[in-house]
Image: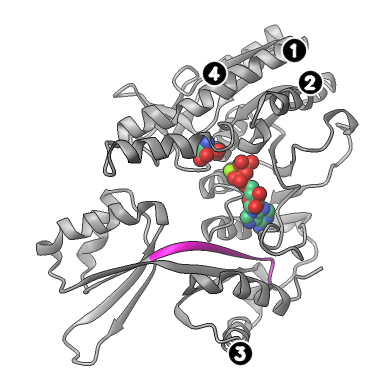
């Protein structure tokens, strides 16, 4: 049997009982003969609390210190899981990002993994049959020696990076749902689980708001050809046959998917909108501040001399984005800066759109019939996104889910 990476998210390690449950999942795979690297998240809610404390201490805080604070959640759970594994007779050792190391860029709070040292892990697999329990979400910027974090949801990316580094045969993402659904099953009860989804579609779903997997984890999986399997950690660990295929979703190459539907899924995100006077020079300062901008729409105004520029940023970056643009006001030369936090972006995704016309037009019609106003539209080869008022999010998602035949 080969090597496996097993990643457990926040709800899966929410308390000691669940950590024991995770230990049993790991033991099952060890007993089946696998070498295992486990990636853990912080206990559910822990990272939110740490982020909140940073904000409370100062709204515009030093990102290096933010990382020093928020990386601690994973330190707790990796140690606890190692203890729980040892207590059931499994040889285990915890690893923090700086110890392995997981080397990253210095983009604090949004660092990119540059390199994972998997050698020590594989050596210990061979000589001691030792399970590695690795802190997700964190790494180290080696030149400065400082702890970094990978952005919210970053443990998924840690898992895929470790899987690539140790050439794991599969990267299992254990979470609180049993796979990837056509849309968030907590919002649309009629959502269906997909057996397989192509990397490209998952990349769009993730970047467009399905928080089930961090975007960068999918990019990495695609580049390094890591087979990612999303499954539930709540199934009884001992009832699972490690040789059978459990319920879940495989994220894989398009070529592996036989039957293609036009629309695979719908993602949505509650985002914020900014609306300053025009200037391309705004995007420079924003990217220097590591703020992702998307849905850029420019309209020519009545007088022909000025234009409006509308774009969205993640809700968490809203205050920083406004601050950054306000500071660059003389350089940009805008007249007015408006912002709104009550907008949502709905996206429809499917590789099949490449060969089908009129997919978006049907959506516009269906939403108009329900009185939902569309504020901005963007499209690409395999998706389109609509910006609408947040209050209509659920209605819009459900409407589109039925329209494209995704209901059960
Ligand atoms: P973890 O803590 O294990 O990393 P997350 O909360 O980050 O888990 O991601 C799992 C959640 O993602 C699910 O509980 C679900 O509500 C949400 N989600 C959003 N879109 C989807 C989707 N298309 N399929 C499955 N889950 C989704
Ligand atoms: N604990 C981190 C977060 O909540 C990373 C993760 O869970 O993936 O964002
Ligand atoms: Mg997550």
Label 3 or label 1, whichever comes before in sequence order: 1
Question: Which one is closest to the eye, mark 3 or mark 1?
Answer: 3
Mark 2: C-beta under 8 Å from nearest atom of ligand 1: no
Q: In this view, which residue lies farthest toward the bottom?
A: 302
Residue 123 image position (x, y, % from top left): 62, 12
* 102 vs 322, nearest the viewer: 322
Tell me the residue that label 2 is attached to. 27
Q: In this view, which residue lies farthest toward the top?
A: 127
Labelled pair 1, 2 in contact (Cβ < 8 Å): yes
Label 4 neighbourhood size at 10 Å, few (<14), some (14-19), many (20+)? Answer: many
Distance, label 4 to label 1, CA atoms, is 16 Å
Q: Quadrant of the C terminus?
A: bottom right
Q: Secondary structure at mark 3?
A: helix
Label 2 or label 3, whichever comes before in sequence order: 2
Residue 229 drawn above or below residue 183: above
Distance, label 4 to label 2, CA atoms, is 18 Å
Mark 4: C-beta under 8 Å from nearest atom of ligand 2: no
């Amino acid at each position: 049997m080969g090597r496996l990476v097993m990643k457990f998210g926040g709800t899966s390690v929410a308390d000691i009982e669940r950590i024991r449950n995770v230990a049993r999942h790991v033991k099952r795979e060890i007993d089946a003969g696998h070498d295992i690297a486990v990636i853990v998240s912080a206990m559910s809610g822990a990272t939110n609390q740490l982020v909140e404390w940073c904000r409370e201490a100062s709204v515009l805080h030093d990102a290096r210190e933010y990382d020093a604070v928020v990386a601690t959640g994973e330190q707790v759970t990796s140690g606890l899981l190692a203890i729980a594994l040892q207590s059931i007779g499994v040889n285990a050792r915890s690893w923090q990002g700086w110890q392995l190391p997981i080397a990253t860029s210095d983009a604090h709070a949004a660092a990119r993994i540059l390199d994972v040292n998997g050698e020590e892990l594989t050596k210990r697999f061979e000589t001691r049959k030792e399970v590695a329990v690795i802190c997700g979400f964190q790494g180290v910027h080696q030149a400065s020696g400082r702890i970094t974090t990978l952005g919210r949801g970053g443990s998924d990316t840690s898992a895929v990076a470790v899987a690539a580094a140790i050439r794991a045969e599969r990267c299992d993402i254990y979470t609180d749902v049993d796979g990837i659904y056509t849309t968030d099953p907590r919002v649309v009860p009629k959502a269906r689980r997909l057996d397989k989804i192509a990397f490209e579609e998952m990349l769009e779903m993730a970047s467009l708001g399905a928080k089930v997997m961090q975007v960068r984890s999918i990019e990495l999986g695609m580049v390094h050809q890591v087979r990612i399997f999303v499954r539930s950690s709540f199934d009884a660990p001992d009832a699972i046959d490690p040789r059978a295929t459990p319920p879940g979703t495989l994220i894989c190459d398009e070529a592996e998917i036989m039957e293609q539907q036009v629309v695979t899924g719908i993602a949505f995100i509650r985002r914020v909108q900014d609306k300053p006077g025009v200037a391309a020079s705004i995007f420079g300062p924003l990217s220097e501040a590591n703020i992702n901008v998307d849905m850029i729409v420019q309209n020519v105004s009545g007088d022909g001399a000025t234009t409006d520029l509308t774009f969205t940023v993640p809700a968490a970056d809203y205050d920083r984005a406004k601050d950054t643009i306000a500071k660059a006001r003389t350089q940009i030369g805008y007249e007015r800066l408006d912002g709104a936090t009550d907008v949502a972006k709905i996206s429809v995704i499917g590789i099949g759109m490449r060969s089908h016309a009129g997919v978006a037009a049907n959506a516009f019609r269906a939403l108009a019939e329900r009185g939902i106003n569309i504020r901005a539209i963007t499209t690409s080869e395999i998706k389109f996104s609509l910006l609408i008022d947040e209050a209509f999010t659920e209605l819009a998602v459900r409407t589109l889910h039925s329209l494209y035949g995704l209901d059960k």
